[in-house]
Image (cartoon, rainbow, N blue to C red):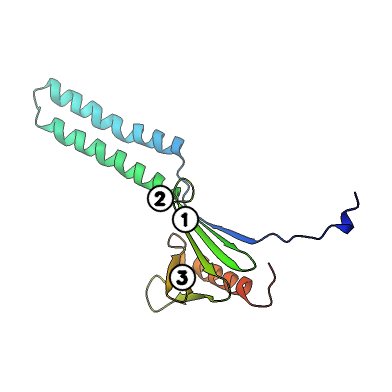
Amino acid sequence: MDSSSEPLTEQPFCCVIAPDGSLTPKAAWGFGVVACAPIAIGAFWAGVMGLWPILPFSGLESLAVIWTLRHCLRRNAYREVVRIEADRIRVESGHQGPQQITDFERSWARVRLDVAVEPSRLWLVCRDQYLELGRGLSELERRRLAQRLKEVMEPGFSV
């Protein structure tokens, strides 16, 4: 079949926003073992020597390490996917797939970068809807994202 006879369909603009996190589950597991092993060894010897009041504190310290690693892994898994199509803008956000989906009319949507606060905040605004984007980005990345979204959302830019 001749490909020139078929109309070309343009792909929508898609941007995946993710925090800069390099901690992998395997690395977190390794760090957790390395951090909790001395605590467990110390707690064992304290128990053998009859210093049992130390045991609950050792357990709480291990739980704090595990909770912190779990929190870091969960934060690193957060994603925001911005799709700009011909008539709408869809933002999907969540940790293990889209947990929240927000749609905006492209013709009414605007990008607002609020630099009056530190760190700056990037907003997608449409009439009475406000959605903050890029909370996990650095200041420079947030400014670049705002500029790119403004370019793509211009009326002359075809998606």
Which is nearer the N-term, disc 3 or disc 1?
1
Give the residue drawn at x 35%, y 31%. 33
Residue to which mark 1 is pinned: 93
Q: Residue 110, position in %: x, y? A: 52, 76
Give the residue drawn at x 48%, y 76%. 112
Tell whether 131 sits left or right of 1: left
Closest to the observer, 63 or 37: 63
Which is nearer the N-term, disc 2 or disc 3?
2
- Residue type indicated by callout 2: Arg
Q: Residue furthest right?
A: 2
- Residue type indicated by callout 1: Ser
Q: Residue furthest top?
A: 48
Which of discs 1 and 2 lies nearer the camera? The answer is 1
Which is nearer the N-term, disc 1 or disc 2?
2
Which of discs 3 and 1 lies nearer the camera? The answer is 1
Task: Give the Cα distance between marks 3 and 1.
Answer: 15 Å
Query: Is residue 19 visible to us here?
Result: no
Quarter occupied by the C terminus: bottom right
Compared to residue 21, the image places residue 142 above or below, namely below
Give the residue drawn at x 37%, y 75%. 117
| Circle 1/circle 2 CB separation < 8 Å | no
| Circle 3/circle 1 CB separation < 8 Å | no
Q: Residue 31, position in %: x, y? A: 38, 37
| Circle 2/circle 3 CB separation < 8 Å | no
Give the residue drawn at x 11%, y 22%. 49
Residue to which mark 2 is pinned: 75
Dot 1 lies on which element? strand
Residue to which mark 3 is pinned: 122
- Residue type indicated by callout 3: Leu
